[in-house]
Image (cartoon, rainbow, N blue to C red):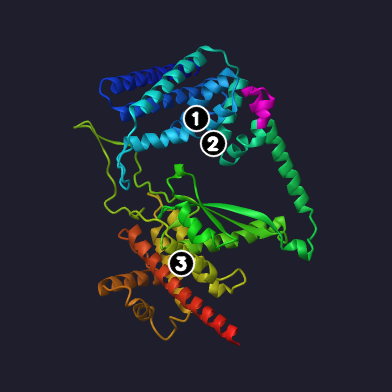
Amino acid sequence: MYKDEKDRISACIKNAKDLVKAAKAVISSESLPNIAFHLSIAAMEEIGKACLFRSLMYRTRPESWVRKRLDDHIEKLNYALLTPIFLKGHVTNTEISNVKSLANSLHLKRKEALYVAFDSDDFLRQISSHEAGAIVQIAEAKLEIEKMFSEATISPENLQDFDWFIDANSDEEKRGWIYSQESMTKLAQLNNDMRSWVKWLQQDSMNREKELQNLLQQELMRSKPGKEEASKRKWKFKIRLLAISHSVQQKILDEGWNHHSDWIKLSAAAEKKGNRELIFTFSLPNAVHIRDTWHIGYWPANLFVLALNIGSKGLFWWYSLNNQNTFYEEILDLDSNKYLKIKPENPALNTDWGNKKLETSDLARISLCFYALPKATASQEEQQPFAEYLRGLGFLAKTDIHLNLTPNACDLFFRSLKSGMKFYGDWDENTSFAEAFKKFFKEMIQQDEHVEELIKLSDRFEKGEKADFSDLTFDIVMQVKELCDVYFLTVFQKFAEKEITKLKLERKI
């Protein structure tokens, strides 16, 4: 095992050396700064990989932990950038601050300079010869330091501390604390000694965990607050959603939502997520006991997810849909010795959303939905359409090539539509669902054939047929979901208009 890891480390260093050599060649002879930039970043990733293999060699981390990080570009760059700082044992605030965002920015810039973008005005980011030359020099310097690291004697304890520091840097919450003013002040007090600082960080982390446990015990013993204290905000929830169908921009969120809402605040995640994450926060009052925070907080969280999906007519969820539509790693044609990529003829796992962005008009509809959706005290009959809608979203999120749950999702969206039309008075027992459906959607769906197809599909689910649903694609399911969105938005709009009329009459009186 020891020999294998040493061989792997040597191979990484040799490959990094070759990549740096190639980067220097293309920038000097061919004048290709973008390619030189890419090769230099790849060299640094190989250096980071060598650091990961060293964790295996010293047995400070299990193989599963290392394997998970081998395909993470930013993680490997973090190792390459932080290793020399940790090795020399002395660090300044400036060095730490620079490393904080350098790995992420290098990775993003490399992608933008290597691949032509579909929706960018520039198509391909241009790296200057000066910038490419600087990155080549950095990669070369990191390579020399890595050689020194390989020849140096490092204790497993020091390497374990280093692995802990890298892990903490990968955690958003811990990273904020590591680079806080308090932490930077402590680093200065320790005469910028890196290893002593990391030891302090670990101890401080354990102390914080103990404090949290003590606070938890105190909260469990807390008596009921008085009337004045009960309304004070105490519990702040932060929830992260994946924007599967839309991209999100902070400027739009501020203008369309945050400037008008005190209770719920929206923010776009960091740029490294490609504007595909939406974070929302809300607070609960002091009157809510810690034992009830999960239960009471879960309802407004669900309510907002409902509003987001209905109002945007898109797809937002707590975790990503599994769009893996292959079951193999590779297929080799032995005759031609070429690798093939074969996908199902009728994939039912994803849809083409196009280049949709969350706009101010979407946020206005989301606000309407959040206002009009049933509250926690509403009857089961009123809540039923939306409980079925949420379950439909959940089935979509759990669909993959091995377990296609799109029929289950489609069935639940139809159930949501039917129970909603019953509750809001657009379908009664005297008419068939087909009649009620055609009456409500006649102006929205122009093609009669398409209407009939959707009604037939609804009938198949209603009769509980154990039919073959291989023809049911993700696109069809999303069409049924959008019928729900259109219907509920229409109902909510009428509800809002009635409320506005009611307020006007009250003011006149």
Q: Which residue is mark 1?
A: 78
Horizontally, residue 377 falls left or right of residue 338, namely right
Corner quadrant of residue 203 = top right
Q: CA distance from mark 1 to mark 3?
A: 42 Å
Which amino acid is tagged 1?
Asn
Say few, some or many: other residues with alpha carbon within 10 Å of mark 2 (under 14 / 14 to 19 / 20 or more): some
The quarter of the image holding the C terminus is: bottom right
Question: Looking at the picture, how far across and down is residue 406, in whole percent?
Answer: 39, 58
- Kindly identify the residue that appears in the image at 56 percent across and 19 percent down: 87
Marks 2 and 3 close (CB-CB < 8 Å): no
Question: Looking at the picture, how far across and down is residue 420, in whole percent?
Answer: 47, 74
Q: Which secondary structure, mark 1?
A: helix
**Sequence-wise, which precedes: disc 2 or disc 3?**
2
**Sequence-wise, which precedes: disc 2 or disc 1?**
1
Q: In this picture, which residue range is highlighted in magenta?
A: 185-201
Marks 2 and 1 close (CB-CB < 8 Å): yes
Q: Which residue is mark 3?
A: 365
Q: Which residue is mark 2?
A: 170
Magenta highlight on residue 190: yes
Horizontally, residue 471 falls left or right of residue 240, namely left
- Kindly identify the residue that appears in the image at 48 percent across and 55 percent down: 317
Q: Which secondary structure, mark 2?
A: helix
Say few, some or many: other residues with alpha carbon within 10 Å of mark 3 (under 14 / 14 to 19 / 20 or more): many
Q: Which secondary structure, mark 3?
A: helix
- Kindly identify the residue that appears in the image at 51 percent across and 21 percent down: 54
Question: Looking at the picture, how far across and down is residue 80, in whole percent?
Answer: 48, 25
Q: CA distance from mark 2 to mark 1?
A: 9 Å
Magenta highlight on residue 298: no
Horizontally, residue 505 falls left or right of residue 141, namely right
Instruction: Tell me if residue 23 can be seen.
Output: yes
